[in-house]
Image (cartoon, rainbow, N blue to C red):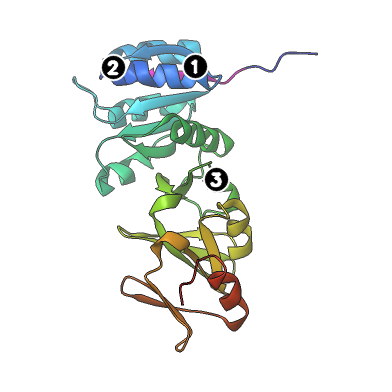
Amino acid sequence: MTEEKSTRLWIVEDNLSFALEMEIFATDLGYEVLGMTSKAEDALEQIPAHEPDLIIMDINLEGEMNGLELAEKLEPTGIPILFITVHDRPDYFELAKTTNWAGYLVKPFDKLSLQAAIEMALRSPHSAGKEEDLEENILRPDCLLIKAQGVYHRVLFSNIDFIQSEGNYCTLFTKERKYAIKISLRQLLEGLPKDQFCQIHKSHAVQLSRIDAIDSVAAEVVIGSHRLPLGKGFRDSLIRRFKVLK
């Protein structure tokens, strides 16, 4: 049996400690790191000769050329680029889309988030701006990695207050913001921890630890300033999740 060829990466990052951390992450995940460069000029000289499957590149490189300018010069190679940056700037994002970009990952991130971003980048290297579907969002043991407009957002299950669905779309509400993904509520709940989440209505599910009150008279569940509908068929199963003191 022929051994499957590992994915070959090239890292362009001028922060040495972060570059080494990414190399360790990538190696642990089974990828082959062909090389690392800190300067755009060196990367431009070396990358075409090695032909990696994916370039992981910091946008904010020191020197005469930044990552976006380097990406423009590497465009003829057709090698997809996963951009990384500490800045969630719309102008950087728009400029990145004009290159061989395959995604945009905001620092800091962990090993699983990097793996998910690499997998998505290789699956569809030049479709980061298209409408997302279920396959473009990855479930992990403790989080969802949601791809929105080409930017990967790591959403911890513990940060989700509740979920609202409409057709085949779900909106995840957290304290900071909300995220829309193309997936049915049933499919999403199948992947979420059953000890943390409970469906309360045909179009709503909540994280149990976020519930402030259950109003059985008004048939509502209260989470902060939100009053969510409590369906008659879901009331008893929700109550059973708690120890009720009378």
Category of crowding for the residue at label 1, using alpha-carbon neighbours closer than 10 angstroms: few (below 14), some (14–19), many (at least 20)? few
Residue placed under numbered mark 2 in the picture:
17
Identify the magenta region: 6-11
Residue 168 is drawn in which quadrant? Answer: bottom right
Left or right side of 42 for 194: right
Helix, strand or loop: magenta stretch = strand
Write the residue at 53% across / 19% down: 31
Which element is circle 1 on?
Answer: helix
- How far apart are labels 2 and 3 at the CA level? 28 Å
Instruction: Report x, y in % for residue 38.
Output: 28, 15
For the residue marked with disc 3, what is the amino acid? Leu
Residue denoted by label 3: 139
Residue furthest to the bottom in view is: 217
The residue at the point 80 percent across, 13 percent down is 1
Q: Nearer the viewer, residue 115 or 35?
A: 115
Numbered mark located on residue 27 in the image: 1
The residue located at (33%, 13%) in the rendering is 37
For residue 26, above or below residue 239: above
The residue at the point 52 percent across, 36 percent down is 125
Q: The disc labelled 1 sits on which kind of residue?
A: Thr
Expressed as whole percent of the image width and height from the top left, the position of residue 41 reads 28, 15
First in residue order: circle 2 vs circle 1: 2
Farthest right residue? 1
In front of the other: 46 or 89: 89
Q: Are marks 2 and 3 in contact (CB under 8 Å)?
A: no
**Earlier-in-chain disc, 1 versus 3:** 1
Residue 172: tell me if it is visible.
no
Decide: few, some or many residues near mark 3? Use Cα within 10 Å; few <14, some 14-19, many ≥20.
some
Helix, strand or loop at label 3? It is strand
196 is higher (above) or lower (below) than 93:
below
